[in-house]
Image (cartoon, coloured by chain):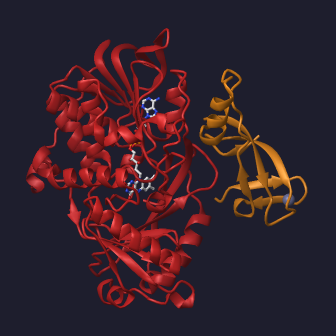
Amino acid sequence: MTLRITCPHCGTREIDEWVHGEIPVVPDDITDADDRDVDRAYFHNNVEGVVREAWFHLYGCRRWVTLERDTRTDAFQ
Amino acid sequence: MNEFWEAKVKLQWAELGSSYDVVIIGGGGHGLATAYNLAVNHGITNVAVIEKDYIGGGNSGRNTTVIRSNYGKPEPVRFYQRSLDLYRELEAETERWVMHDERGLWWLAHTEAGRRQERSRAAINQAFGADTTFVEPEEIGRLIPGINLDADGEFPITGASFHAGGATARHDRVNWAFAEGAMRAGVTIVQGVKVTGLTLDGDRVVGVQTDKGDVAAGTVVGAVGGHATTIASMANVRLPIRTHPLQAFVTNHYEQTWDAIVASNDLGFYVSQTARGEMLGGSHIDPQPSYSRRSDHHFINEIARRIVALFPFMGNLRVLRQWTGICDMSPDYTPIMGYTSAPGFLITTGWGTWGFKAIPAGGEAMAQLIANDETPELIAPFSIERFANDRTLADRGSSGTH
Ligand SMILES: Cc1cc2nc3c(=O)[nH]c(=O)nc-3n(C[C@H](O)[C@H](O)[C@H](O)COP(=O)(O)OP(=O)(O)OC[C@H]3O[C@@H](n4cnc5c(N)ncnc54)[C@H](O)[C@@H]3O)c2cc1C
Ligand SMILES: [Zn+2]
């Protein structure tokens, strides 16, 4: 089954209507400004578990929606 | 090599001990080849490979088995050419039949920009030791059976690079060949044991914790494919990796011999024929990061449409099986190998959708690094330091799909 995402504005739609957006979070213990830039540019939390992320409903209402998903199962919370 | 020899493959499973010189987490091709090289070429045999499922149960047993060295940057071309050469010798080296089949790989262009890219690929390949030439459309039409050169007017072919060294090999047999050779040389390989933590002494990694007990180690290697971030975080090492699903499929048996391996960047797919006669195809990663190995219809719909435009005969075939692996994608589509900020903890990752071809050279280089405690020149450009040092090796146009 194709993954489906429920939009608060449009209802449940298939994933190909959506664009995924990572919400980058640079860890607080990286304090040097350059190091924070490198981390933001290249590094990822890549969570194996529940992650908060942004989805853009491109072929729908064209709005960003923030959702939580378990990356082990793709179940939206 | 023949079936009688193959019947003699004998995997000797041992019990997991409590202390090793080297513990390798992950029994995929990279972990197994590293263990094999340590034991066979460096005499380091007090080694354990710890696999949570079964060996080759990750991407090394799920890939589409394309072997090639036609990359777009000097450092990767050299490295993958080394691996391609090692694959040529793998049957003699391991005395096991891995169904290595060198048949050449076509990389099609459908635009002017694509044509320029394939021309420059051929030039860079020739300069750094890979056998690739540029080919005009008329010749492509003569040499690839069943191809529709104007692709229904949608994606007309404007040229291709032909990589004569392009090959395939049976993935399971490659994994087993390395596993068996490592076991024969004294390596302990265990299945069904999951690493749940790393034992730290300050910053230094001194062992692994598993669901079957703790194991001390002089050196720990993370070779866990899509789970790289999870393992590295246990050593407080942060990676530039995102884990994305990659899907593939095979059709039912196609009765003709179809000897080519064909890839297209613009259309985002590649296809070859398996030894069983199935047509085997794959595409890009799924756009969202995920650790789920579920397959979907969206992938098949998309790829089928594009493949049939180019190869109308495939419209008469049926999809028989479809599956998914989770890929450790690096930001520049180039591997990340070697030391980390945690002493005693090494990684081999960033293999994404392209690491099967790299198994022999990856294992060789990681074993050299461990044995000599020095990064071999061949993989020095692949160090994780390259991101902070602004020395990335962006090569998506060569690694995006296979
Ligand atoms: C559909 C698909 C097609 C592909 N096609 C090609 C191709 O044509 N050519 C090519 O060169 N590459 C291809 N690739 C990429 C290639 O398969 C991989 O890059 C390569 O197999 C990676 O090998 P590995 O040993 O690093 O990882 P894997 O083979 O994934 O092995 C990692 C192992 O670690 C184990 N593990 C994970 N966590 C733990 C833990 N906590 N404890 C113990 N064990 C653990 C896993 O179970 C797994 O067996 C493809 C990949 C996919 C998914
Ligand atoms: Zn919407």
Q: Position of residue B29 (x, y in %)?
A: 32, 42
Chain shaded orange: A
Ligand 2 placement by image quarter: bottom right
- At 47% from the left and 35% from the top, the residue drawn is B384
- At 71% from the left and 59% from the top, the residue drawn is A15
Q: Is residue B11 above or below residue B153?
A: above
Q: Which part of the image, by quadrant, shows the N terminus of chain A?
A: bottom right
Q: Is residue B122 left or right of residue B39?
A: right
Q: Position of residue B147 (x, y in %)?
A: 40, 86
Q: Is residue B170 left or right of residue B74?
A: left
Colour chain B appears in: red
Q: Residue furthest top?
A: B201
Q: Position of residue B123 (x, y in %)?
A: 34, 68
Q: Is residue B249 left or right of residue B242?
A: left
Q: Say whether residue B78 is visible.
A: yes
Q: Is residue A43 left or right of residue B209?
A: right
Which quarter of the picture shows residue B273? bottom left
Query: Number of callouts in the render?
Result: 0
Q: Position of residue A2 (x, y in %)?
A: 65, 59
Q: Which part of the image, by quadrant, shows the C terminus of chain A?
A: top right
Q: Say whether residue B111 is visible.
A: no
Q: Is residue A59 above or below residue B360?
A: below
Q: Is residue A15 above or below residue B42?
A: below
Which of B38 and B337 lies nearest the eye of the viewer? B337
